[in-house]
Image (spheres, rainbow, N blue to C red):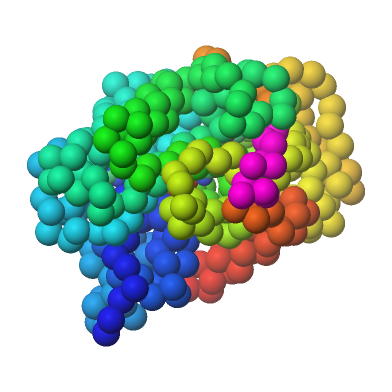
Amino acid sequence: MKFKKTALITGITGQDGSILADFLLKKNYKIIGIKRRSSSFNTERIDHLYTKHVLNKSYFPYYGDLTDTSNLIRIIQQTKPHEIYNLAAQSHVRTSFETPEYTANADALGTLRLLEAIRILKLEKKIKFYQASTSEIFGNTKIPQNEKTPFAPTSPYAISKLFSYWTVINYRKAYNIFAVNGILFNHEGERRGATFVTRKITRAVANYFLGNKEILYLGNLNAKRDWGAADDYIKTMWMMLQQKKPSDYVISTGVSKSVKDFVNEAYKCIDVKVIWKGKGVKEIGIDKKTKRTIIKIDKYYFRPTEVHELKGDSSKAKKELKWKPKISFKKLVKTMVESDIDKLKNLNFN
Ligand code: NAP
Ligand code: GDD
């Protein structure tokens, strides 16, 4: 089979990596995926690639890690990709406060290692590089945030990602590498990790719908995020690498909602109206019909420093990439709740 191009995806087992792999396979790419060795299964999101694509040789998994320089050099040397999508990261903001050194190693130095590997192998002219940057680098700056907004990162995760952001720009200027930062705002979907707040909520709602009356414990209900759909956002990664000139882009919906808004919308999908009572850590969410307490606050989920509101302005992407999001907040929440109900039903059935 003749492939158009070869793409190397780090973080292929994650939400974005798995969706990007599906997207690029449809475009007749050969995919090289880097996955970590794990004592339990970590390939649930890409298992479908094994049966279909390993057999027709369009998908090649490699064991690797962003903290292992020689491993990264060897994979790039052996596979000579046209495009590298660096999506691997310790991507959980709260966890980064507990593992700051590891987060910096993977999320900051990992990017440097990949770009250095390109230089060491003299592939500067041959490989295009996409870096998964993030709206977290803006921290608590004025909204809406765009490519010209100053950065004020407020977590080890965001600081590490900002190191990568500047490294990409430096390697672009210093060595003429086609390297870009996609500054993506929060994007969610059926494959979202269960410890991120949206999926945590939609799973709890699905459980409640199916009769499990456990309380959902959350942290800061007032933080606001610009939540988009991963299915809308992933294609922009590829689009950025198809431009004539490398440049950095903000990808967002331009609408920001609070965690509480998300909770209200998610329970609405199963016809439950949430009534809020109390303040601060004493605030609770009650099912209006049954009067049952369904949501409580647990301080454990608070962060030492919080980003209060993210809201993006993606006019540049709209103009230059001709991109705009299609999936609304309502539709996103509904899809996630329905998908979790289906998944849990199947689990119970088995
Ligand atoms: P995710 O679901 O947490 O996936 C992260 C991926 O990175 C997983 O495949 C994980 O492997 C892998 N990984 C973690 N540490 C690694 C290491 N040291 N070496 C190699 N692989 C490693 O994250 P996501 O939501 O798909 O996000 C993808 C990228 O975009 C991340 O860099 C994230 O920081 C960034 N980002 C995400 C969003 C968003 O809203 N989703 C927004 C902006 C930026 P395991 O499966 O083995 O854990
Ligand atoms: N995870 C989590 N769990 N967050 C909670 C909870 C909870 O129980 N309760 C409230 N929150 C609040 C957090 O304090 C934060 O303000 C907001 O919900 C969103 O948290 P996450 O879903 O963990 O995402 P994030 O915004 O911190 O980070 C995500 O988006 C970034 C882009 O802005 C991740 O995907 C990052 O990797 C990504 O860069």
Quick check: 206 left or right of 61?
Answer: right
Residue 98 in view here: yes
Q: Quadrant of the N terminus?
A: bottom left
Magenta stretch, residue numbers: 310-320
Identified at 82% across, 22% down, the residue is 278
- Residue 99 on image: x %, y %: 34, 24
Q: Residue furthest right?
A: 289
Quick check: 119 left or right of 223?
Answer: left
- Residue 27 on image: x %, y %: 44, 73
Query: In the depicted view, which residue is nearer to us: 310 or 142?
Result: 142
Which corner quadrant of the image does residue 305 belong to? top right
- Residue 92 on image: x %, y %: 45, 34
Residue 200, above or below 105: below
The reply to whether the magenta stretch includes residue 89 is: no
- Residue 350 on image: x %, y %: 47, 73
For ligand 1, which image quadrant applies? top left
Query: In the depicted view, which residue is nearer to us: 155 or 242?
Result: 242
Quick check: 66 left or right of 259?
Answer: left
Identified at 32% across, 25% down, the residue is 104
Residue 23, above or below 213: below
Identified at 32% across, 68% down, the residue is 5
